[in-house]
Image (cartoon, grey):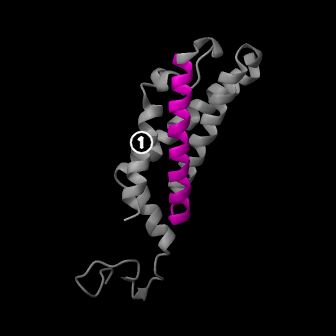
Amino acid sequence: MGEPTTGARTTGTERKEGRVNEPTPAGEESAARLVSGPGLLLVWLYGVMSVGAVSRSVYQIATEFEHAPLAYSLSAVAALVYAFITYTLVRGGETARKAALVCCAAELVGVLTVGTWTLAEPSAFPDATVWSDYGMGYLFIPVLLPVTGILWLRKARR
């Protein structure tokens, strides 16, 4: 009785214990698409990067901000970007997908800009940021993550 009455796959309305469930809202289906398969790995990686960047920047800003204010501020910005992208991926829906796509693009621009800046003028950064040297201190995850995110979010649109 818990099975659908037809052999076709259902999209949210199915028979369960003699009742018909309400259709699944489109946002929930979209959220499931964003956090399934490679999307789940993206959520996990963005979550880990959020925690790492937030804890690092909070500690550095609280204890030694005057040593490298630019680097520590940029790490805090990276932390906010990671947290927002994590939130939008989990939230799902078309609006959240578009917001995550824009943030991934902005993150990529930030990583490339800061990465190039740290190589061209190392004296501007007495201490490293999350995005220094294109994320070398984080195994280049900061430069690979937005590229992967953009590809996944564009694919999830279809």
Element type at marker 1? helix
Give the crowd class for mark 1: few <14, some 14-19, many >=20 residues within 10 Å.
some
Left or right of 99 on screen, residue 136: left
Task: Name the residue at 54% across, 17% down.
Answer: 120
In this view, the residue in front, 27 or 67, is 67
> On screen, 45 above or below 10?
above
Q: Locate residue 130, reporting x and y percent.
A: 55, 27
Task: Name the residue at 69% across, 21% down.
Answer: 60
Question: Residue lying furthest left in this view?
Answer: 7
Task: Name the residue at 63% across, 40% down.
Answer: 80
In this view, the residue in front, 35 or 19, is 35
Left or right of 149 on screen, residue 109: right
For the N terminus, which image quadrant? bottom left
Task: Name the residue at 43% across, 27% down.
Answer: 140
- Please give the count of numbered marks on the rendered protein: 1
Q: Main secondary structure of the magenta part?
A: helix
> On screen, 93 above or below 115?
below
For the C terminus, which image quadrant? bottom left
Give the magenta-colored segment's residue range: 92-119
Q: Locate residue 49, reporting x and y percent.
A: 52, 35
* Residue position marked by numbered label 1 in the rendering: 147
> On screen, 134 above or below 149?
above
Question: Residue lying furthest front in this view?
Answer: 120
Question: Three-letter amino acid code at disc 1?
Answer: Val
Residue 94 part of the magenta segment? yes
